């Protein structure tokens, strides 16, 4: 895998000389580490959701009543995976799924009272972890980092 990364990056202005200078590797390492820390924090705080379920709870935090298909698009996940995750969440009474009045084939996803309580607790735990990770970064650096990642995400989406 590493040799493939090096082979494809030799035409760049700055070729990574190691994994520690390869931004793709570093992004993956960050995501993996944060995922592990968040999973541990959820277990410690007895929050009964997976990271995938939490991603949906976060979307519903901002857009309760969003279409199931839009959730899949936002998370970059296929329909089957989203349906499975949502079905588990419905079974656990975290969310409800209703027909979309604008399109009977579509489903709208809403938090239940139980889901909202877990969402608030999970968002609080996640927020504390987020602050531990970025809290000591100067705002200017964080803003520049976000802009850089947004550009990289746009570039990678163009490859799909």
Image (cartoon, rainbow, N blue to C red):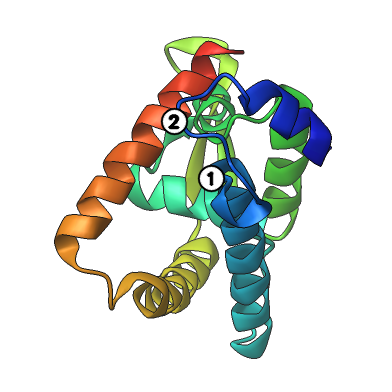
Using residue 81 as the reference point, say whether residue 100 is left or right of it. Answer: left
Residue visible at 36% across and 29% down? 151
On the image, the x and y values in percent for residue 109 come to 52, 38
Circle 2 residues within 10 Å: few <14, some 14–19, many ≥20: few
On the image, the x and y values in percent for residue 150 come to 36, 34
Residue visible at 56% across and 34% down? 15
Residue visible at 74% across and 25% down? 7
Q: Which quadrant of the figure has residue 42?
A: bottom right
Looking at the picture, does residue 82 appear above or below residue 120?
above
Residue 116 marker: none
Q: Which of 53 and 140 is in front in this view?
A: 140
Residue visible at 40% across and 76% down? 124
Using residue 119 as the reference point, say whether residue 30 is left or right of it. Answer: right
Numbered disc in front, either 2 or 1: 1
Q: Name the residue under label 1.
A: 23
Q: Name the residue under label 2.
A: 152
Using residue 8 as the reference point, say whether residue 122 is left or right of it. Answer: left
């Amino acid at each position: 895998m590493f040799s493939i990364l090096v082979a494809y990056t030799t035409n760049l202005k700055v070729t990574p000389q190691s994994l520690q200078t390869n931004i793709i590797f570093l992004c993956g390492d960050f995501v993996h580490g944060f995922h592990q820390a968040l999973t541990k924090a959820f277990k410690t705080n007895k929050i009964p959701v997976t990271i995938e379920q939490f991603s949906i709870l976060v979307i519903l935090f901002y857009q309760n009543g969003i279409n199931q298909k839009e959730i899949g698009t936002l998370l970059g996940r296929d329909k089957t995976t989203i349906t499975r995750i949502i079905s588990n969440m419905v079974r656990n009474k975290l969310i409800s799924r209703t027909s979309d009045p604008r399109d009977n084939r579509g489903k709208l996803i809403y938090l239940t009272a139980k889901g909202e309580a877990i969402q608030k607790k999970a968002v609080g735990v996640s927020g504390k972890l987020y602050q531990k990770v970025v809290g000591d970064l100067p705002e200017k650096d964080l803003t520049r980092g976000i802009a850089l990642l947004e550009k990289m995400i746009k570039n990678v989406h163009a490859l799909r």
